[in-house]
């Protein structure tokens, strides 16, 4: 026995954790080898007997080994994900059934004449019919179905032109401020605009930049904002055609640039320059004429500013780059990625608007201020280079058909009219010097140019009227007009909506109109049959390069950036091509939605697509990144058959 604990011998290399004896293990039932997650352990009894034990990789197991998932999710999370997949898969099938029933009900309503607001007619000479809105693009994608359903085209058109007038007034106020800043160094201008005195008090570089560069940049910014506002307002103009919307926007931009950015800025600068003469009432007209020439310097700086900035912005496309970056960052599914990067139709309103502004300046000041000519030439040349690059490499597609050069002919006509600006301006300046004969000749020359251009263009572009038709054709048109709008026929009244059966509707129609032999009744009866597939494309509507991921998902899946340049053609006719000649509303002819899966190297997407098509009758495609990824789905007739099954 040791009386003191210090006398106990101590080993400095001993482990303190083992100083205390380990408690005995609790008895646990042995785990059977078939339940183990790894290979069965060696049997200690057989090992002691000296019998040879086979190696682990040669032992037989009653169950496959358990592999833990490497996704980082536990079993509950994975179960919730698969539960969501099953839920939305059933929900998609239910939605497909609802869509099929709604389409059948829509065709039935068309056959019975319920809630019909108009017709889409295809043929020649339709402009002779009253109340016709022409689809100038002559393509299916050019139709604005929402505007056709809304039917408030006249009031929307009035609201659009009111918005254009308001934008023009705001632009005029902004250009007036820019002109005042540019003419701050002129005599007696600071006397009437005293808040500009600090700018011109110092004859240095900042003052020069403030009176030369700043007004040009501000004027360019105001003009760009005006074009953007007109472009946004044109989408609410109530036109039934996308091409008509763009033509309206371009015409509005043209007149705003010519009247406000071209004429008003010169008038405002001239009045500011001659403010002192108008105040003292001495030599008003010569002073205002001198102000016109002094304003040409501001126009030169505006043109140079546009020639440098606008082509660069058109080539770099910073706004489009930022939008694509945000959409790609938010995109999760392949369909969202396709919509994020697929180019839209190129809108030339900004580039052509700047060219129009330069041509207006050149047409008015080419002789009075020759330095503006090279600047305008540089602006037009660089803008055309940027325009050619955009339509060739960035926006290489058309989605609104062809107009036959309507806009181009209108532009040429207006440019010919702009040739009268130079003699008008020269005539006014000469008249301010009291040279009446020479000024009168110039004003007369300008009026003659306008008259000759308008007379020639009117004769060449004049369309034959109703009197050019034969008497038989005129009688047929009058009969059609009388039968097209019988009393109480359309308008969505409660009587039409209350009819629930075809027989009741047919009786009420016969009782109201007296006969079922009218033209529109015959057209309504033919709409009761779903149109079949027709591989022979009619001349109208015109084909376009539009690609809709909802109706042509198989083609959209081939647009992946990693896809090879050449792929085997589709072994079937997709729904968009089948319905290319059918001018029904898109919601009536929309196919069942195609599930678009993200492709992967492990083949999970391909197996999932097979399961969806084979067991759930849901059409599925995957991203095409190699020729082996091209799937062969069923044709659209099978799609419609499956659509009625579930």
Image: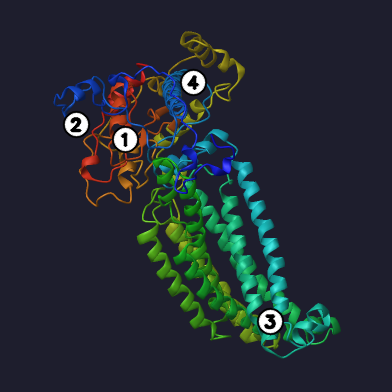
Point out the tag, 4 or 1, that comes first from the N-terminus: 4
Query: Which mark is nearer the camera, 4 or 2?
Result: 2
On the image, numbered disc 4 is attached to which residue?
113
Disc 3, SS: helix
Q: In the drawing, what numbered circle is on residue 605?
A: 1
Point out the tag, 3 or 1, that comes first from the N-terminus: 3
Point out the tag, 4 or 3, that comes first from the N-terminus: 4
Mark 3 is surrounded, within 10 Å at the Cα level, by few (under 14), some (14 to 19) or many (20 or more) other residues, namely many
Q: Position of residue 626 (x, y in %)?
A: 24, 45
Label 4, label 3: how far apart the Cα atoms are: 67 Å
Label 2, label 1: how far apart the Cα atoms are: 32 Å
Q: In the drawing, what numbered circle is on residue 57?
A: 2
In the image shown, does 444 or 594 lie closer to the viewer?
Answer: 594
Query: Which mark is nearer the camera, 4 or 1?
Result: 1
Disc 1, SS: helix
Label 3, label 1: how far apart the Cα atoms are: 64 Å
In the image shown, does 470 or 208 lie closer to the viewer?
Answer: 208
On the image, numbered disc 3 is attached to which residue?
211
């Amino acid at each position: 026995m040791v009386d003191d604990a210090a006398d106990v011998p101590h080993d400095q290399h001993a482990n303190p954790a083992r100083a205390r004896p380990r408690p005995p293990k609790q008895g646990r039932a042995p785990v059977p080898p078939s339940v183990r997650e790894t290979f069965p352990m060696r049997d200690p009894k057989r090992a002691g007997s000296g019998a040879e034990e086979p190696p682990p990789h040669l032992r037989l197991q009653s169950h496959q080994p358990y592999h833990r998932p490497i996704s980082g999710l536990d079993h509950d999370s994975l179960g919730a994900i698969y539960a969501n997949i099953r839920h939305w898969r059933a929900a998609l099938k239910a939605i497909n059934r609802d869509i099929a029933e709604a389409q059948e009900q829509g065709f039935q309503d068309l056959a019975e004449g319920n809630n019909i607001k108009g017709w889409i007619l295809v043929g020649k000479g339709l402009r002779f019919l009253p109340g016709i809105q022409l689809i100038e693009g002559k393509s299916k994608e050019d139709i604005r179905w929402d505007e056709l359903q809304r039917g408030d085209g006249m009031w929307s058109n009035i609201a659009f032109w009111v918005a254009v007038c308001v934008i023009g007034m705001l632009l005029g106020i902004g250009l007036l401020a820019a002109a005042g800043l540019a003419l701050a160094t002129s005599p007696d201008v600071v006397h009437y605009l005293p808040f500009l005195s600090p700018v011109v008090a110092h004859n240095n570089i900042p003052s020069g930049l403030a009176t030369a560069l700043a007004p040009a940049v501000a004027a360019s910014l105001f003009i760009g904002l005006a074009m953007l506002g007109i472009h946004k307002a044109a989408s609410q103009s109530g036109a039934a055609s996308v091409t008509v919307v763009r033509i309206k926007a371009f015409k509005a931009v043209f007149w705003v640039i010519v009247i406000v950015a071209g004429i008003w800025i010169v008038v405002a600068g001239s009045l500011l320059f001659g403010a002192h003469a108008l105040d003292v009432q001495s030599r008003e007209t010569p002073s205002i004429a001198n102000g016109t020439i002094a304003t040409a310097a501001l126009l030169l700086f505006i043109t140079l500013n546009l020639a440098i900035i606008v082509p660069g912005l058109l080539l770099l496309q910073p706004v489009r780059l930022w939008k694509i970056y945000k959409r790609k960052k938010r995109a999760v599914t392949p369909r969202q990625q396709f919509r994020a990067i697929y180019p839209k139709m190129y809108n030339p309103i900004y580039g052509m608007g700047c060219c129009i502004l330069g041509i207006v300046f050149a047409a008015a000041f080419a002789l009075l201020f020759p330095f503006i000519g090279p600047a305008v030439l540089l602006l037009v040349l660089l803008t055309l280079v940027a325009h050619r690059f955009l339509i060739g490499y960035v926006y290489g597609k058309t989605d609104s058909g062809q107009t036959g050069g309507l806009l181009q002919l209108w532009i040429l006509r207006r440019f010919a009219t702009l040739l009268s600006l130079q003699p008008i301006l020269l005539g006014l300046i000469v008249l301010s010097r009291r040279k009446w004969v020479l000024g009168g000749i110039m004003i007369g020359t300008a009026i003659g140019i306008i008259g000759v251009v308008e007379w020639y263009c009117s004769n060449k572009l004049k369309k034959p009227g109703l009197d050019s038709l034969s008497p038989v054709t005129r009688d047929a048109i009058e009969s059609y007009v009388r039968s097209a709008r019988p009393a109480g026929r359309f308008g969505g009244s409660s009587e039409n909506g209350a009819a629930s059966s075809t027989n009741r509707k047919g009786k009420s129609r016969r009782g109201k109109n007296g006969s079922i032999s009218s033209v529109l009744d015959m057209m309504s009866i033919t709409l009761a049959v779903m149109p079949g597939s027709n591989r022979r494309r009619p001349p109208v509507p015109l084909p376009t390069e539009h690609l809709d991921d909802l109706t042509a998902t198989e083609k959209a899946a081939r647009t992946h950036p990693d896809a090879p340049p050449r792929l085997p053609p589709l072994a079937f006719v997709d729904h968009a091509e089948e319905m290319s000649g059918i001018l029904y509303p898109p919601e009536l002819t929309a196919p069942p939605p195609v599930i678009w899966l993200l492709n992967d190297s492990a083949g999970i997407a391909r197996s999932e697509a097979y399961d969806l098509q084979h067991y759930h009758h849901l059409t599925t495609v995957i991203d095409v990144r190699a020729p082996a990824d091209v799937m062969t789905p069923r044709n659209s007739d099978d799609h419609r058959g499956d659509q009625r099954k579930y």
